[in-house]
Image: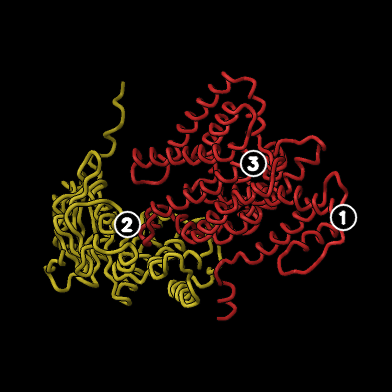
Chain colours: A yellow, B red
Amino acid sequence: MAAREIESPRAIVEFRDLLVRYAESTALHSINYSVERGRWLGLIGANGAGKTSLLKALARLVDFEGAVYVEGRSTLDLSRREFAQLVAYVPQKPEFPPEMRAVDYVALGRLPHLGYFGAEGPRDRVHSLELLERLSLSAMATRHLSTMSGGELQRLVLARALAQEAPVLLLDEPTSALDLGRRVEALELVDELRIERGLTVISAMHDLTLAAQFADELALLSGGEIVATGSADEVFEESSLDFHFGTRVQILRTDDGELIVVPRRTKPKGSHARAPA
Amino acid sequence: MRAVRLATSPVSPRVPLLVTGLGLVVVILVSTAIGPADLSILTVAGILLSHVPLVHYHSSASAINQGIVWDIRLPRVILGGIVGAMLAAGGASYQGVFRNALADPYLLGIAAGAGLGATIVIVASSGSTSWLPAAAFIGGAAAVTLTYVVGAKFGGRSSGTSVVLAGVAVAALFTAVQTLLLQQHAPDLQNVYSWILGSLAAATWSNVWLILPYAVVSAVVLLMHRRLLDVLRLGEEEAASLGVNTRRVRLVVVAAATLGTAAAVSVSGLVGFVGIIVPHMVRLTTNASYRVVMPVSIVGGAAFLILADLAAHTIESPAEVPLGVVTAFVGAPFFIFVLRSRRAQQGVL
C-alpha cells in the first residue's frame, strides 16, 4: 500500500480514524489529529479518558484500527527497529533494575541502532556519556540506580529515551513521581531539549496549569474522543472542564497572562459533619 | 575523559569468568583424583594431558589407573559439568524471561514431564533403562511445549504470568498421572524414586556424547541473548519500545533453556536447586547484568555440580547419596549465607 498523502506537509505525527478497543470497552475512537514537527502536544483529560491509550497506540504497544503515520509512513509498515529509531517512549512508571549502573541504563537506549545480537561500541558509550553530561548526571555515571533520587531517575530515563535519537518523544505523565520543584525543572528540561534537538513531544499531563505553560497545543480527551484542541486559552473553559473532569474548577489568569487551573471542592466545608443526635 | 571512559566501559564478565574458569579446572582435577583408587592430582593431570590432541605427552601411569581416570571418573565429571552448566543457564534464563527471582528451570513442567517419561519406561520395561534418557527428554520437552501452547493461547499478550500458571497446571497433571502409575506398580517405586533424586553414577562417555550437541546449541543461543535479557529487565513495554520483539525473545530463550535442561535431566534425573542458587550467587558476588550472569553461571554451574557430585559419592563411600539431596543440603545453607551479604541488602535480586 502506498503511503497516503498527509494533510499538512509539516506534520510529523498523524492519527487517522484511530480506534483502540480493549476486551470489554472502546478506549479511543475516531481520533483524527496531526502534530507538526517541533511542537509539544499536551494530552489532557480525566483518568480513563484515553490519554495513555493514545500514547500506547502511537508507541505501537496496543493493537489499534485506523492508522498512525510518523514521518509520513504508517507505523505498522515499519520494522520494530525502524520504529524505535523514530519514536521514543517513556512510560508512567519506568522500571529501574536496582543494580544497573546509570551509564549502562542509558546505553540500552542505543539498542535500535545496533544489530539483533550487536553490542554497543565505544561510539555508543561516548554518546551515552555525553547525554549524561547534558542532563547533569556525569557524576552519577557509575552509580547504581537504587542509589539515585526520583529527580535523578527522571532525568536518567530522559537520557535513555534521547539515546534512541528518535525525533518523536512520548511521555506518559512525566512528572507524576516528582515533587513540585522537580516537576517544573523536569518539564523545563524537556522543553530545552525539544528546542535544542528539534524534537516533537507528545505528553499526557495531569497538571493542567503546567500543561498550559509548557505545551504548544492541548488536546482535551473525554470518553475516548478528542473534544477540544488548541492553545490553553482556547481549550480551558470552566464549564467544559467541569463537565469533562466531573468536578468544579476555577481558571485564574496571572498578571503575565498565564492560566492557572484550580480544582474546587464541590460540597461546602462542614457538609460531611454528622448531624447532632 | 579517559579515566571516565574506563570506569564506564561496558560490564564485562572477564574477571569473574577467569576466576570461575580456574575454579572449574581445579574442581575437575580434584574430583577426578579422589576415589577408591588413590591417585595424585599430578598423575591425573598427566593422564588428562596425554589425551589432549596435538599435545604429545605420554603418561607414565599404569594402564589400570589410566582406565580408571579416563573411562570411569572423567565421564562422570564431564557429564556433571554439562548438567550443572545447563541447569544454571536454564535457571538464569527463566529468571530473566519471567522476571522472577524464584523461577527455576523446572518452572514450566519439565521435571514433571521428564519424571512421567522416566516412570513410564521404568514401569514398562521393568528394569532396563536404555530408553530412560530419551523418554525423560521427550517427556520434559512435551510438558514445556504443552505449557507454552496453553499459556500463550489463553493468556493475553502481556508478560509471562499466564505461561507460568499453565506450567503449574501441566506439572500437576503430569505428576498425577505419574503417581497413578506408581501406585499401580509399587515394585518399581524404588527405581523411579532414585532416578527422581538424581544421580550421575551410571555416567559413560556415550551419555556425554548424547547430550553434548543439545548442550552446545542451548548454551550458544542463550549466550547470544544475554544482552536482550538485560533489555527485558526494563519490563515488557520499555523493551518493546526499544524495538525488541519480546514475545519472540521469550520463546527462543525458553526453547533453548528447555532443550538444555531436558538434555541434562535425561541423564542425571531431577537435580534441584542448581538453577536457583548458581545464578543468584553470580548476581550477588559479581553483577546482575546478563552479560555476566549467563557466561559465569554456565562455568560456575559446571563447577558447582561436579563438586556436589564429588560429595555425593564420597560422603558415605562406597554408598552414594542422591545428588539432589547434596545440592540442596550444601546449597541451601550457603545460599542463606550469601543472602545476608551487603549486596543482597542493597536489593540486587
Picture quarter containing residue B328?
A: top right
Residue identifier under label 3: B268
Quarter of the image where the N terminus of chain A is located: bottom left
Q: Position of residue A254 (x, y in %)?
A: 23, 64
Q: Give the SS element for disc 2.
A: strand
Question: Mark 3: which secondary structure?
Answer: helix
Q: Quarter-wise, where is residue A185 in the image?
A: bottom left
Reading the image, the residue beneath label 1 is B62
Distance, label 2 to label 3, CA atoms, is: 50 Å
Q: Nearer the viewer, mark 2 or mark 3?
A: 3
Q: Does A196 sit left or right of B60 as displayed?
A: left
Mark 2 falls within which chain? A
The chain letter under disc 3 is B
Residue at 48% x, 48% y is B99
Give me the disc on residue A172. Answer: 2
Q: Secondary structure at mark 1?
A: loop
Q: Is residue A82 above or below residue A271?
A: below
